[in-house]
Amino acid sequence: MEDWKHFLLPYQQAVDELKVKFRGMRKQFQDLNQHAPIEFVTGRVKPVDSIKEKMVRRHVEEDRLEQDLQDIAGLRIMCQFVEDIYQVVDLLRKRTDMTILEERDYITNAKSSGYRSYHLVVEYPVYLVTGEKKLLVEIQVRTLAMNFWATIEHSLNYKYQDDFPEELSDRLQRAGEAAFKLDTEMSEIREEIQEAQNLFSYGKKDVWSKYENQDQERTDDTP
């Protein structure tokens, strides 16, 4: 690969566009005074060193890079509740600006390590000055608890390179189960939590309205 910057530019465009679209979905729910299943969105283009390492590990040739590496462009959608994950997936299925090619439910079918998340691989078109280009993008949808566990496990993996000591592996697996138990407990009181969050949001709006009115009164009284 002679020019990685040129090769990765469309992937960065895809990530930037999808972050705007998914964050826009959250704002639409908020505008309707409804619970937003999307808490926040992050995205990244895989670093060149990571791409090269994965090419070697998976025996991917350069001319097959776009087809065989599905996570060069990656987005994560974070949710408060497990139920939100499946709502987000349903919303993505209905979109016409992307085509879902693969779905992998690691929530119902958790990995032996304790990893949980919902993965989708989509085909997403970006429009360049040279025309349309369709790219593979991986989207991971998970709760905040799942993301905390996955982030820690990913950091440890740099140290152990998938060869965890048995005791550490067991502890990670138990931590994954504990994180999912937390998600389950939160789901059982989801209605109470959402009601409290709605009250809190309305309270903040009332406070801001009060300050705005006070500012307007000061402006009106200014000679």
Image (cartoon, rainbow, N blue to C red):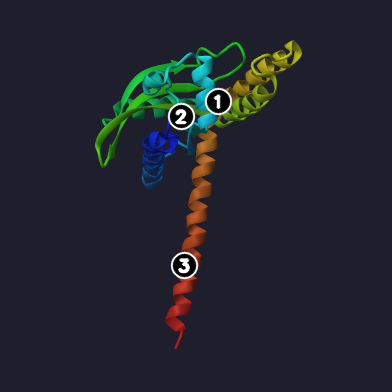
For the residues labelled 3 and 1, the Cα–Cα distance comes to 38 Å
Per the model, the C-alpha gap separating discs 3 and 2 is 34 Å
How crowded pointer 1 is (Cα within 10 Å; few <14, some 14-19, many 20+) is rated as few
- Of the numbered discs in the image, which one, if any, rests on residue 188? 1
**What residue is shown with label 3?**
212
Residue 89 against residue 206 in the figure, above or below: above
- Nearer the viewer's eye, disc 3 or disc 1? 3
Which residue type does callout 1 highlight? Glu
Residue 30 spot, x, y in % from top left: 41, 45
Question: Where residue 53 sits in the image (x, y, percent)?
Answer: 54, 22
In terms of secondary structure, where does tag 1 sit? helix
Q: How far apart are marks 1 and 2 (CA)?
A: 13 Å
Residue 84: assigned label? 2
Image quadrant in which you'd find residue 16: top left
Quarter occupied by the C terminus: bottom left
Query: What amino acid is labelled 2 in the image?
Result: Asp
Residue that appears at 54% across and 29% down = 49
Residue 81 appears in the figure: no
Determine the residue located farthest toward the front in the rendered image: 2
Q: Residues within 10 Å of mark 3 (few under 14, many from 20)?
A: few
Say if residue 154 shows up in the picture: yes
Counting residues from the start of the chain, the first of labels 3 and 1 encountered is 1
Q: Which amino acid does label 3 sit on?
A: Glu
Mark 3 or mark 2: which comes first in sequence? Answer: 2
